[in-house]
Amino acid sequence: MNQQRNGHDRVAVVTGASQGIGQAFAVRLAETGRRVVLADITDTSETEKLARHAGAEVLSVHTDVSDEQSVAHLRRQVEGTFGGTDILVNNAGTAAVQAFEDTTLEQWRRMMAINLDSMFLTCQAFLPGMRERGWGRVVNMSSNTLDLHLPWGGAHYIASKGGIVGLTRALASEYGPFGITVNAIAPGLVRRAAVRRRHELACRGTAHQASRAAGRPRRDTLVPGIGRRGVHDCSDAHRRRRDRPVAHRQSRRCPGPARPDRRGADR
């Protein structure tokens, strides 16, 4: 049954909406007339204030995206308030820089649960309704670390982000015929408080050179800029080409460390 809603009736769920990229998405969606659902395990009051100021209807739901029951509660709250979801922005996640040999199985599983399992749960919760209405937009947040040389670790983080790309491609192919697009965005470092604090701390200790190699966030990785570009993937203007079922798009990234020079390596 096709029950498409027009742009101003559409409902957008944004996970990890309390700050950073998630907040930028939520505010931009509010500015473009969508009704916005803020899902986060931390306080979303600041984002809610900004979205209401933009004139949007807002629902905040305390959500642990790695927990099946919590995501089911989120779906019930959205359906009870707005009748369903048209747009899903899977932004919630965590990050860690850690040597592979120092990574425990518990840490590995926690990273996968928050970054990858969460998208499995939210997509399973909201894609059926999108298919029933014949329209939907899903945006998954990956990372540009998939294409960087990072000698200081983080294998569990990078693996989780690579899994997001695979999940995105599979869902784009499966749900494309039902008027649903599924895309991934791969941002680099962005200018937000947590990144600035980590950079300052790293520069005080032995990680100074690694931090310099990672680079500071560039002007084009300002958080609102990613929100503006990403919201295009949530619009009617975005169309799926059958020969390209998904876009794995990177923001222009910060300067990374140079690739190792292999010349003469075998001599």
Image: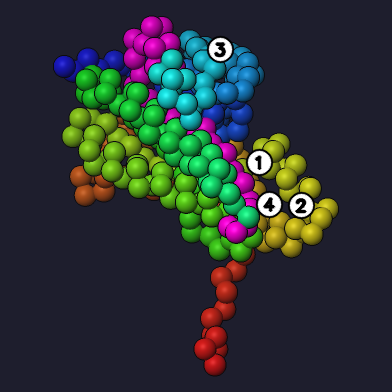
Residue beneath disc 2: 202
Q: Secondary structure at mark 2?
A: helix
* Residue in the picture at 79% in, 59% down: 206
- Amino acid type of the residue tagged 4 in the rendering: Arg
Q: Is residue 74 left or right of residue 196?
A: left
Magenta stretch contains residue 87: yes
Q: Is residue 211 left or right of residue 10?
A: right
Q: Secondary structure at mark 4?
A: loop
Which stretch appears magenta?
Answer: 74-101
* Residue in the picture at 24% in, 34% down: 175
Which image quadrant is residue 5 in? top left
Q: Secondary structure at mark 1?
A: loop
> 12 and 153: which one is in front?
153
Quadrant for the C terminus in the image: bottom right
Measure the C-alpha gap from mark 3 to mark 2. 37 Å
- Amino acid type of the residue tagged 3 in the rendering: Arg
Closer to the N terminus: mark 2 or mark 4? 2
Specify few, some or many for label 1: CA neighbours under 10 Å numbering under 14, 14-19, or 20 or more. Answer: some
- Amino acid type of the residue tagged 2 in the rendering: Ala
